[in-house]
Image (tube, rainbow, N blue to C red):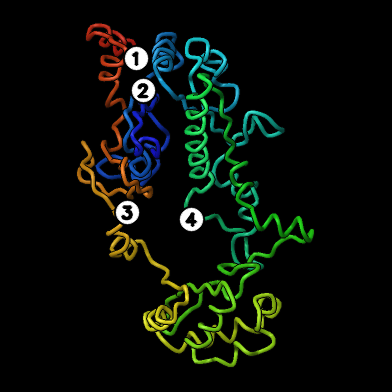
Amino acid sequence: MMLGDLGAEIIKIERPQSGDDTRAWGPPFVNSESAYFLSINRNKKSVALDLKTDEGRRIFCALAEKSDVLLENFTPGVTERLKIDYETMKKNNPRLIYCSITSYGQTGTYRDRPGYDLVLQGMGGLMGITGEHDRPPVRTGVAVADLGGGMYAATAILAGLIARSKSGRGQWIDISLMDGVVSWMTYMAAYYFATGIEPTKLGSAHPTIVPYQCFKTGDGNYITLAAGNDKLFRSLCKSIGMNHLADDPRFLTNSKRVENRDALVPILEEAFLSKPHNEWLKILTEEGVPSGPVYSLEELFSNPHVLERQMLMKMQHPTAGLISQIGIPMKFSETKPEMKNPPPTLGEHTREVLSTVLGYDEARINELERKGVI
């Protein structure tokens, strides 16, 4: 979808009859269309094609021969059985960028295991550091392992295209969702490497910055607060009318505040219960202290800043009607990304692609449809 937003022509190959699994992920549905599917499939053309048939594979290979990029997410070994693996595809298109996204990658002990986002969040280390202390592990609210794998794939594909512009050759890109989650351990892994100590789950708090977390306010709402340096901590103390805290030897530096987290945080928690969240946010903003509300989705998608940044868009869908879409987060001064096409219905573009890309006439397309190939 990211590459489609940036202008690529995307042909999505789906199974006839059932299509992409996420078409059935619901409720909620919008006039029979899965809300989940609608969220991640704009700017794609759908071709329904049975890759288990010889004719279906021939069509697939013909499309790959004309393409810059082939992106697949089969379990390792499936493409070889279908004879659409990289080694086969590059014989007819040596410039092809072939990207495989799998749970665990094309190599390694877990190569052949099935996996879903939840499993990979756990195995990649993310769930081990997410949640409240002494509470069960918590999955992040969206499928970040899946989303991160797609983002790494998009970056790698673009890098592959740049490399091809110099060498003239394509290559195989191996993206593992677990690798992506492991890579996000960043400073948490660095702390472990430095100390050998497993990090403690801290909820919304930060292991090496204090205060940097959510606080409950007098009206029951929460605010986020990030005093990332000593100057900001001093501004915070002024905001809450407790200048003496900034001069307390226990809290003079961030290192001291981390050491004395259990003494400082209860003081702040009690202070923030004295006023409603909007009043606190006004005070903190005036003092330049980074802070914000914890928005619900209703609040988020009615927020003027979000709307001004065009992060909520509308599209007309052939069966679901007018649908909302999250906007494009990349802004360009010259080559503006576009939402050209709504998420496709199953096989919506099969005839168009076979006709315009491969030159099939109507009789041939009708015969393929009669045989169940498309």
> Does dot 1 land on a helix, a strand or a loop?
loop
Whichever of callouts 3 and 4 sits on the residue coming sooner in the sequence is 4
Q: Amino acid at mark 1?
A: Gly
Image position of 273 (left or right of 338)? right
Tag 1 residue: 372
Whichever of callouts 2 and 3 sits on the residue coming sooner in the sequence is 2
The quarter holding residue 349 reads: top left
The quarter holding residue 295 reads: bottom left
Query: Comparing marks 3 and 4, which lies closer to the viewer?
Result: 3
Query: Comparing marks 2 and 3, which lies closer to the viewer?
Result: 3
Mark number displayed over residue 76? none
Quadrant, the N terminus? top left
Q: Amino acid at mark 3?
A: Met
Whichever of callouts 1 and 3 sits on the residue coming sooner in the sequence is 3
Mark number displayed over residue 16? 2
Image position of 214 (left or right of 369)? right
Q: Amino acid at mark 2?
A: Pro
Query: Comparing marks 4 and 2, which lies closer to the viewer?
Result: 4
Residue at horizontal 69%, vertical 85%? 250
Q: CA distance from mark 1 to mark 3?
A: 40 Å
